Image: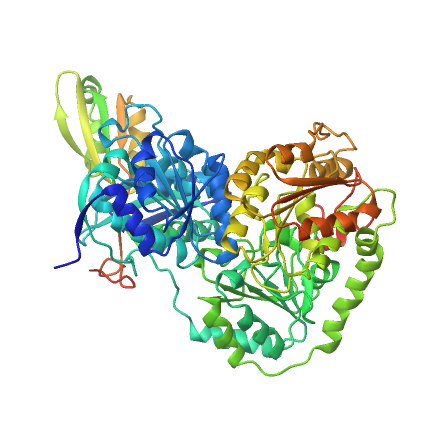
Amino acid sequence: MDNRESVSGSVSLMKSLIEEGTDTIFGYPGGQIMPVFDALYDYRQKLKHILVRHEQGAVHAAQGYSRASGKVGVVIVTSGPGATNTVTGIADAMIDSTPLVVISGQVVSPLLGTDAFQEVDIVGISQPVTKWSYQVRRADEIAWAVAQAFYIASSGRPGPVLLDFTKDAQVSMINHYYEKCTSIRSYVSMPKIDRANVRKAAELINSAKKPLALVGQGVEIGKAEQELISFIEKAQIPAAWTLLGASVMPFDHPLNKGMLGMHGNLAPNQKTNECDLLIAIGMRFDDRVIGDVNTYAKQAKIIHFDIDPAEIGKNVDVDIPVLGDVKKTLPAVTALLKQADHDDWIESFDIINGEEYDRVIANEIYCDREYISMGEVIRRISEKTGNEAITVTDVGQNQMMAARYSKHKNPRSFISSGGLGTMGFGLPAAIGAKIAVPDRTVCLFCGDGGIQMCIQELGTIMQSNVKVKIIILNNRYLGMVRQWQEIFFNKRYSETPMLNPDFVKIAEAYRIKGRKVSKRDDLDDAIREMLEHNGAYLLEVDVEKKGMVLPMIPPGMNVSSVILEK
Amino acid sequence: MDINTQTLYTVTVYSENHVGLLTQISNIFTRRFINIESLTVSASAMKGVHKFTITCYSDDKAIEKLVKQVEKKIDVLTAYYYVEDEIISREIALFKVTTETLMANNTIESLVNRYNAKIIEVNNLYTVIEKTGGKTEIRELFDELEHYGILQFVRSGSVSITRSKYEQLSDVTMC
């Protein structure tokens, strides 16, 4: 006899979540999910619920939680608007491969399709932006559906899953029995490793004179940071990273040659078009990385390590695909590598990066202009945290500056909305990250635009006492759009100047300590105060109004068109 | 997209018989602006496994990427794509013409014989002709009959079978 017991569907859901190791839920109650919140009341010791202020905030917080911890983020919301408010976050998690289980309430099943109060076809709406989306109409399906959801969300290339629970499924009584899902016949979570391609990849690397590795978030998701280091060290391969791969390698590793892409470092971008072998590892050749696909690395052979067969050849033609879990494929290739040295090749990166330092970086992070620059704020904070904080960003100039000038010793230290570029992501994501890893310092860099897109989550910080450090780089513009207007739209600043509220007063209203800094001389003291304060802190920095993120490769162009100076 | 420079592909998809899968699959086409020319869904030779047969115009790179995205759907067992000579395909078409034109001369009847079609209903007002065959044949018959006036015309999606011996699902463990 199994250990079955008669419980309501809602209790079955609580028990199922606990079976999957869930201990934190981000959510917001409402009519059609009330039985679940009622059951949660009895489980609140085991399942800590973080009450957000908007369902979009719940999803971004769950994303931050997942990205900081590697665990599945869990969200519970009501039907109708509660469910539709999650869509942006779900789409963001989909494109950035973040495992989430989003649970929405739904009207009772006899009312489905009748335009009932707060009824929306969330399964239909969410299908294009989820890995799996399923409506649970019967309580006896709950344990099965939750097991499937967690398995699908966290295995293979991770992603968001939505489960839509009709209210009758939440209240009917069933015999609860839980069994974890370990396979689904129609779903291959882990492609078989092709030994021949592993061998071919190793041969190509062994014969390469100028190899370059491109490192993405896939290495972090696959927990293969050490395997990556062994791989690049053995064959002495210089490596560069995508935005979401910013904290995969320690910043001071001699083979770490910086960021790729539109606002990336000069050397890795130039060397992409000079190398004889490009080794992409857990990255997806995003257009912001490759620019003009027709002139991208045409001289090089390309090896692509990925877990998702659909990524192979999607944006760039590949010579050798190495499908599988990087935790296994990287060591398999490393074992076949010969020790090599590419000293001249490696050094050539440092020469170009030195040029970028002199022409761009030094002026930004050790600014002597009248107003504070964005880059110097980030550099100072990164230094003061010993480069050990988790950097969370919003989207825009703050994000690119943070990616360029915050440094990371440890993995899972850079959390940003990469693929979707969701303004408003930062504040809730920082909340989720801090809740996931309370012992680490979490610094959010955001602009005056993005902070206002989810500013209501200051209420979550207040209610759940989340000790995040919020740094607003206030230039009174939607800065990245303004930068594009300056370069590509003849300085016609259409709808980008912002009239902003007093952010410190808003923080104060939420009982969050805050300070505004306009002078460079006050900056270090304010940063010290922020980091020493045992609680949430909002630091507003007045930065130069027309700061620019440089270098910049204009969209659809290649590195030869790079803009270095204003 | 100019369909004249493109190839007609047949995509076959084997899936679980789950609600909502059709939308998920057709969305993959829509997002890439590939128009579905025809679509049929039916049970396959394997119990519990459904088979979609979809035809569309595309090019070899785009179709390969599209099929990978289809395969990525959790409830899809596997998906393949074929060009015309790799498969045997048939469509069924129904033509309605006035019985008056049929009676007026022998041409329609001889067309029916020549194209291996058959007359399945005749009454005072109209005659219904059924034709099973390849896309081109049906098109040709349509063009011929059009001279005499077609009251109604309908054709099914393609049903296709590969030239291999069994359903191509060997890489999936069927249970």
Colour option used: rainbow
Callout count: 0
Q: Quadrant of residue A318?
A: bottom right
* Picture quadrant where residue A504 is located: top right
Is A237 rendered above or below residue A112?
below
User: On the rendered structure, is A389 left or right of A321?
Assistant: right
Q: Is residue A241 left or right of residue A147?
A: right
Residue A128 seen in render: yes
Q: From the top left corner, tell me how far across and down residue A410 is, in percent.
A: 60, 64
For residue A401, side relative to residue A84 (left or right): right
* Residue B13 seen by the camera: no
Residue A110: x and y in percent read 22, 29
| Residue A98 sits above or below residue A482 on the image | below
**Residue at 31% in and 23% down:** A115
Q: Where is A525 relative to A107, above or below?
A: below
In front of the other: A226 or A306: A226
In the rendering, at what x and y percent does residue A99 appear?
Answer: 44, 52
- Relative height, residue A195 to residue A257 (above, below): below
**Percent x, y for residue A479?**
72, 38
**The C terminus of chain B is located in which quarter?**
bottom left
Q: Nearer the viewer, residue A402 or A428?
A: A428
